[in-house]
Amino acid sequence: MTECVVPRIVIGGVSSGAGKTVLSIGLMQSFKRRGLSVAPFKIGPDFIDPMFHRAVVGGPSRNLDSFLMNRQDILESFDRGCRGGDIAVVEGVMGLFDSVDATSEVGSTAEVAKILRAPVILSVNVAKTARSAAAVVQGFRDFDSELNLAGVVLNMVGSKRHRDKVTEAVEQLTGVEVVGALPKTKELHLPERHLGLVPVHELKSDFQALTSVVEEYVDVERIIEIAGSAEPLALAETLRESSTPEKTRVGVFLDDAFRFYYADTLSQLETGANLIFIDSLRNKKLPAIDSLYIGGGFPEVYASKLEKNKGFRNSVYDFCATGGRVYGECGGLMYLGESISTDAGEFEMTGFLPLETVMQKRYVGMGYVINQAACDSLLAGRGEVIRGHVFHHSKARLTGKADFAFKTLRGSGITEDRDGMIRENVLASYMHVHPLGCKGFIDGLINPPPDSEIKKQDQ
């Protein structure tokens, strides 16, 4: 056994919108200003917040998800992400105890914090409340005695008098230390995240501004002390990875339209393959590759540009049609279909899979899913159960006969009960998977059986 002794802190919230992202970004930047190397993490399956983290710290942010990953997976990812770091900042998801279902802690910030043996800083929105905030903090403190609730940051504070009153109530009535009180100010608001219309690099000035506010109103040095109080974390020796010779050439779309990739996915691909990043908007044709991975993103926003790059689309079609191994995930599924329809019109895509996607105003799929493999595929062997996550605003409309690799046990896929459309060696689904929770994923791209074809499900 080895130990991880990196100081660490989990930023939790009373609910979504409590200020976790702002506080996390502000602390990461503040730690950097003090010369510390920050290891960033995000609890849950979200892709957007890790992109914010990367823009701040200059390195990858890893997702820790106790629904998609088991305890050992989480420790492995945390260990890998902390190497070379002086302090780890782990941004939570939703409310501190919010989970997959009503009664378990699976998928919650609290569960991951306990796995990491990390102290928690709770962000509490105190707008329009005072002494009642103490009741909220007391409830969170007492809800799980195994959790180390080490401090509170008040958010949406109206005035100095308001701050002093709430601080006194929380500290005197609960014994939990208030380590910061953020005011109502425009510097602490980030632009709408969902559509991805604001490139992360354009938000760096916003990050600097919010960090200045955090440094003024939060006791950063005290939070560093709290992070340093985290107990050593026992790690199995097997967590240390070894490099393998680079063999398979795996192409990955990475551009404005396709950018949703877990850091662990890319690092594992880099360990076992020659990873080639591809720009679907600007490249004229596919480079020489053995496998292709098209992740999620915002193809609907860039649909016109994708359509105009016809030569490139044709080269993707040809790769698929000649037996190339391809895995498309959400946005990748849309791109491999015939068209994407938005308010701006209908735009041609690759056309290899018999489906069209139509954008909707509201979420069509959001949350965790469980699928069972109906056949052997790049992701899993027949009968295996796969956990994943969906987050999309599009509806798929079949235009011809289709074969599917997965039966949906929880949530929905391309249809109500099927996901994972397959044709030859191409597999595409709405589901995002994590490589530590879907063990066959990386191997399917790097080391598939020779001359294998994805098998069709039993009808």
Image (cartoon, grey):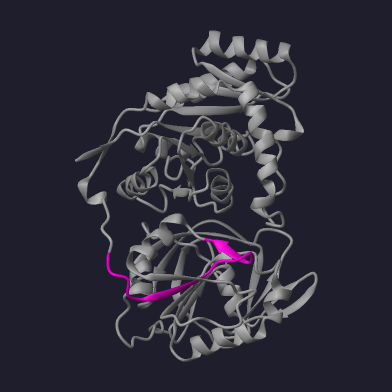
Nearest to the observer: residue 94 or residue 50: 50
Q: Which residues are magenta?
A: 244-260
Q: Report whether residue 331 is seen.
A: yes
Question: Compared to 211, does 383 lie above or below?
Answer: below
As drawn, 410 above or below 337:
above
Residue for point 46% across, 60% down? 388
The relative height of residue 52 versus residue 304 in the rendered view (above or below) is: above
Residue at 38% x, 67% y is: 441
Q: Position of residue 92 (x, y in %)?
A: 51, 39
Residue 415 seen anywhere in this rendered image of the structure: no
Question: Which x, y percent locates residue 246?
Answer: 32, 71
Question: For this view, does 237 lie left or right of residue 197?
Answer: left
Image quarter of the N terminus: top left
Left or right of 359: which side holds 248?
left
- Among the 4 quarters of the image, the one containing residue 219: top right
Quick one: quadrant of the C terminus?
A: bottom left
Q: Quadrant of residue 227?
A: top left
